[in-house]
Amino acid sequence: MRRYLLPAVALAVLLGGAYYYGWIGPTRVPIEVSYAYDVSDPAQVFGDASFVVVGRVEKDLGPAEDDSTAFQVRVLRELKGDVPDVIEVIQDGFRRGRRTWELADFPLFEVGKTYVMALTIPAPDWNQDRLVVLVGPLDRPTTQVSGPDDPAVAAYLTAIGNARYPDGFTSEFVDAQAEMVRAWLEAHPGYSSPGPASP
């Protein structure tokens, strides 16, 4: 019995590591989450966003806070707010070996591709120099586009014009968030934003 125990443990460790790093099993693993508002509604997503940009992903910067990934993005067009030409953003999801964990219907960015990104300021205990990618909007969250003049960008501009604060948020929460955005903007010259929409 003992002579089989060591090989069995070694095999279990080997298979566990192979699965974790994506050598066996699925290469894409969906992360299930719930949201505080309807992220398929562009008016609410853009109402919550402090910035909206068309940006080309230049570099995957690796793991970031809370199972997310940081990216370097070149801003090709600003749709809401003003940001520097090159920014760092954090997106939910991460890669380990050949396996990718990502939100359902919200794949991780790919280097070299261009996306419309709804962005907000980071949580107080996160890296304060990186903006956070919001989930949404429209039928495909964070739409990939061919460039800043892609016809799909017009739909985003219309949605930004109709932006409203997400349903169900209290006025106290809205005021607290607006104060956090103001404080963040004061500490980050080169950025400006009308902030979240009023409720």
Image (cartoon, rainbow, N blue to C red):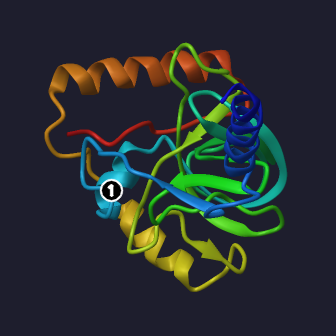
Q: Position of residue 169 (x, y in %)?
A: 18, 34
Which residue ends up furthest to the bottom in the rendered image?
151
Quarter of the picture holding the N terminus: top right
Q: Position of residue 131 (x, y in %)?
A: 62, 36
Q: Residue at x 32, y 64 (%)?
A: 40
Q: Compared with residue 123, is residue 160 higher up or lower down, i.e. above or below? A: below
Q: Residues within 10 Å of mark 1 (few under 14, many from 20)?
A: many
Which residue ends up furthest to the front in the rendered image?
1
Q: Residue at x 72, y 76 (%)?
A: 147
Left or right: 65 with respect to 137? right
Count how many numbered circles sit on residues in the image: 1
Q: Compared with residue 160, is residue 67 higher up or lower down, i.e. above or below? A: above
Q: Nearer the viewer, residue 131 or 148?
A: 131
- Helix, strand or loop under label 1: loop
Q: Nearer the viewer, residue 89 or 91?
A: 91
Is residue 170 shown to the viewer in this render? yes
Q: Position of residue 44 (x, y in %)?
A: 29, 53
- Name the residue type under label 1: Val
Left or right: 41 with respect to 182? left
| Disc 1 target residue | 39
Q: Compared with residue 131, is residue 147 higher up or lower down, i.e. above or below? A: below
Image quarter of residue 109: bottom right
Left or right: 83 with respect to 133? right
Image quarter of residue 126: top right
Quarter of the picture holding the C terminus: top left
Q: Residue at x 40, y 53 (%)?
A: 46
Q: Position of residue 33 (x, y in %)?
A: 36, 46
Q: Nearer the viewer, residue 97 or 175?
A: 97
